[in-house]
Amino acid sequence: MNVSYKWLSEYIELNGYTGDQLAELMTSGGIEIDVVESRNKGVTGVVVGHVLTREKHPDADKLSVCTLDVGGPEVLQIVCGAKNVAAGQLVPVATIGAVLPGDFAIKRAKLRGVESQGMICSAKELGLNEKLLPKEQQEGILVLPEGTPIGASILDVLGIDDEVLELDLTPNRSDCLSMLGVAYEIGALTGRSVKLPDNRVNDSVEQASAHVSVRIEAKEQCSHYSARYIKGVQIGPSPQWMQNRLMAAGIRPISNVVDITNFVMLEYGQPLHAFDADKVEGGRIVVRMANEGEVLTTLDGQDRKLEPHMLVITNGQEPLALAGVMGGANSEVTAATVNILLESARFDGGTIRKTSRQVGLRSESSVRFEKGVDPARVIPALDRAASLMAKYASGHVLEGIVEELTEQPKDAVISVSIAKINRYLGTELAKLEIETIFGRLQFPFELSTDGVFTVSVPSRRGDITRDVDLIEEVARLFGYDNIPTTAIEGAATPGALTKPQAIRRELRKRLTDAGLHEVISYSFTHPDRTKLFPALAGADLFPVRLALPMSEDRSVLRTSLLPQLLETAAYNRNRKNDDVAIFEIGSVFHTDEEALTRLPHEKHRLAVLLTGNKNVTEWNRKAEAYDFYDLKGILETLVEVLGVSGSISYEAAQPEHMHPGRTAAVVYHGERGAQTIGYLGQLHPTTQIDHDLADTYVLEIELAPLYAAADFDIVYKALPRYPAMERDIAVVLSRDVAAGKLIDAVQETAGALLESVRIFDIFTGEKLGSDKKSVALSLVYRHAERTLTDEEVTERHAEVVTKLEQSFAAELRK
């Protein structure tokens, strides 16, 4: 909102305050002023001149020699190159000694042998924004309206000697989207009274209801619609003072009728719209929701396809305007317009905002409706505009206002006690001080004997709805700097990461140290993506749909991290980055309700994806591709860091979209028994082809069980003092036997004497048979307090061999 200092001074006395001082006062009161800009860009000595004669330059085809009366004792001769200069015009003249923007001084000069005693100026040369000028004044010299006093300073005529305050308003202070609203704000800060504009209308005898009828069908979206009928208007330029006000606010003048509606909108904060009444069939106004497929050509010449959620103004049949956003070309006010149907209404802000965003039209009108207009100003603004049209467009205002009101506005009544105000602010304000503040705000109030204020908040302050809002008003008018500071009391606790946060940070560090790149993907995804990896997503659960999605591709919350990692990997491969090692730690969302009635479950998960080569070909080594054991090694490292490796085991699994022979379930053994917390393995070949990926290995696990069981304590033990004895076993057994079960059996049988066991070779071949394999294990025996004898180890080792033979039908390999 741009506020002209001079315009503002018409509603409230500003003596004693410069523009900068006013900005500082308002900013300290809670209304931030971004900048105070002077409209005078460096103009001095420019006056209004009357072109007496214009003759062609004797020695230049494109120059004219003009004589001008500038209100002084002598007539000036000025050489001008503008095509539009003509005798009889009133123009801005920079006399000898004048200065123009850019520190351009005007001196006596000769142009092609003819003396020139000044310069006839264009708008650009005066530092005006040409884009804000009427179209006819954007080229050539600036021609001033008839009746402009000759010799008058151009600073006064064009309102250049002014300052503009640019308000940076928060969404709740829509009351300051009007000159009167800003005036009330300054009145509250300074204690000065506000002078309201004259909106008296001299009605004619003829009744407006004979020409206009109003009906509201969309009662929830339009609570008040009023109209006046003005006959016999003469379309032309608005007065110069009004044009100056509009340009200072950043609005280009168009014509007297349109300028008046914009002027009153800025003055009252109430948007208005003028229809050519002769183009409104039968004078009927029907406010309704748009029909599917309706099309409206708006004032900018664009065809707008309307939708049922859009509010329109119609003549009972076809739309005339997109309510609160923009009028239609079929009822536009033109130079031929004679009769005006003037609208002032109150529309639902949410409806206007949705329409404005969808059609890509955000106007000064829609901004005000979005944030909420003052219902008490609908009629005063209508009367103000009608009175100005009678004065400056020669219109005759017909008797009466035609309106329909579906909701009677009421002022909010709020109670707050003196004790509560002081308790919240930490002050000791007396009753009289608070009474003075409410008086400056012009909020009527009553004070009970027990110190409770009952305040009637005017509808112009729609942001005040609760007692704490009144307390905030007291605070800002009392002065934030005047509120005493108090030391914060209470026990101080040092900041620290929670255990889950610390675990996630440690996981990120370990994974990035291992050469993986972290990705952060959208939590929103396409519904089809939730069907991937049902074992991870939860077959008996439902995805959570968004109420207002950005698009179908982002319409549900993700149920697994892997689909986004696949997208990332495919994106990289499509750009010739074939070697991808990435991970993500994030949330997935589930619900057990098809129709969501409560918050969904949010679960933290870790996902890893490996594809391509883990190293590149060099002179001393060949490239190596990622495999299942690289992925499993990453997970084993992580659970080792978290101290839960003893609680994790792996079982063969065949979840959907995973390779049936190269996938394992990750099982956590905790207090509640064994539970599958995720899967790791290779993607199913079909899934790899669908995503245009080579062999790809993925992992996704739940983090919640690890949060609970993780133990960062480091346990130290003494170095062994006694020697170890190592024995190897090679057994032939069925291919179906998992190597992990062999290790479990060895550990159970060998007992405390066994220090470690590892598999160092697995062999398959025709000699063993198609359903057999050879597994070689290395066992290390050691006693913590003495040296083992060979007999002890041999005996225990024999027990291990017997166990393997009995449990797995294993045979010692010769």
Image (cartoon, rainbow, N blue to C red):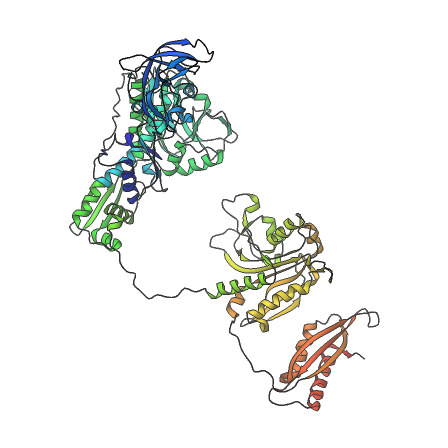
Residue 584: give x, y in percent of width and height: 57, 57
Residue 626: give x, y in percent of width and height: 69, 60
Q: Nearer the viewer, residue 102 or 179?
A: 102
**Left or right: where 430 falls relative to 774:** left
Residue 557: give x, y in percent of width and height: 54, 51
Q: Quadrant of residue 279?
A: top left
In the picture, the quarter occupied by the C terminus is bottom right
In the picture, the quarter occupied by the N terminus is top left
**Left or right: where 736 falls relative to 274:** right
Q: Nearer the viewer, residue 344 or 233?
A: 233
Q: Nearer the viewer, residue 12 or 706?
A: 12
Q: Residue at x 71, y 91 (%)?
A: 791
Q: Is residue 443 visible?
A: no
User: Where is 790 relative to 342, above or below?
Assistant: below
Q: Is residue 735 visible?
A: yes
Q: Nearer the viewer, residue 108 or 162?
A: 108
Q: Quadrant of residue 371?
A: top left
Residue 618: give x, y in percent of width and height: 72, 59
